[in-house]
Amino acid sequence: MINKMLLETSKSLLNNEPITFSKAVYFSRLEGADILDLISLANRVRKEYAGEEFDLCSLINAKSGACSEDCHFCGQSAHYNTNVPTYPLKSEDEILTAAKEAEISGATRFCIVISGKKPDTKDFKKIVSVLGKLHKETNLKLDSSLGTLNEDEIYELKNAGVTRYNHNLETSEGYFKQICSTHTYEDRLSTIKILKKVGLEVCCGGIIGLGEDWDERIRLAFTLKDLDIDCIPINILNPRPGTPLENVPPLSPMEIIKTIAVFRLILKDKIIKVAGGREVNLRNLQALALLAGANGLILGNYLTTPGRTAALDLQMLKDLEMGNYK
């Protein structure tokens, strides 16, 4: 028998009524067969409000390591001994080649990511230049994730062809101090406000499994809703040796899937992208995560950890008859 609360919520959501915080918390506590009904509802909400289009993004870690920030999950922080590769900004040819290979592999978006709080002037000019060439030489939609920029710098990115900028909140405001002390939640919110003022799409999500409880996780989702974020990447902590969170117990696949479903009920018409850590944490249940309301994937490798081939992900979408892969 279908859970009564799920049935009532199904009717209200499909009538365009918002879900409440208390209902989201209730759904986070579902177990057993009720989880499958939650997944089914989330998938229906995705189809109704977000449609069938699927967002496929590939990224390049264009500058790695030696970051001044102390984010407790990050292998690129200079505060920890993690042995991740450290290198300066990659050459223009390396970035162009990576983007064109990503496009051939099936990505529709490409994101240039660098470590650090923000790029220096020299690196920023190089990135703007290569973005301009990518805009002319590929059909990729362009993203970037370069840290905390000012309004003039964001306009430069927009003029170079960037349509979306990534700046994750990582977690809820109440939990943020547990994972970072070198910048504040307000710092991140300020950048998001500038991005929206300039008119770029905002890619902003977080990492689950940092030690936060369900209430904090749901608070993050409602913050993203209040900010009217366009694309929400959900990363799952893949603990990096040497970081303060290296021994945090992993989330179970079903908890991850419930999280995606609850986020979909809160963020009905947005892109919800399953991102870093999915291969390690979801294992053989990645397809079920997509059926739980996701409509985006990061293809290929992540910043400091490997992903799987784009071909495997495209086959998964085809098998699920999702997006344009029916």
Image: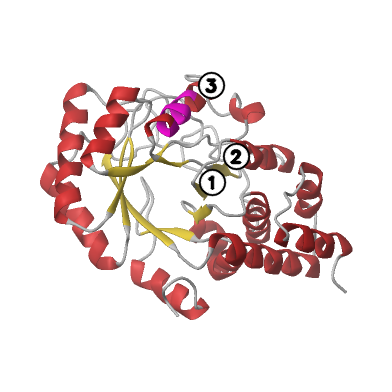
Q: Residues within 10 Å of mark 3 (few under 14, many from 20)?
A: few
On the image, numbered disc 3 is attached to which residue?
186
In space, the residues marked 3 and 1 are separated at their CA atoms by 23 Å
Q: Which stretch is magenta?
A: 190-196
Q: Nearer the viewer, residue 105 or 128?
A: 128
Residue type beneath disc 1: Leu
Query: Could you tell which of marks 1 and 2 lies nearer the N-terminus?
Result: 2
The residue located at (32%, 60%) in the rendering is: 108
Mark in front: 2 vs 3: 3
Residue type beneath disc 2: Leu
Measuring from the top left, give residue 275's x and y in whole percent. Answer: 47, 53
On the image, numbered disc 2 is attached to which residue?
210
Compared to residue 170, the image places residue 3 above or below, namely: below
The residue located at (21%, 61%) in the rendering is: 101
Secondary structure under badge 1? loop
Q: Residues within 10 Å of mark 2 (few under 14, many from 20)?
A: many
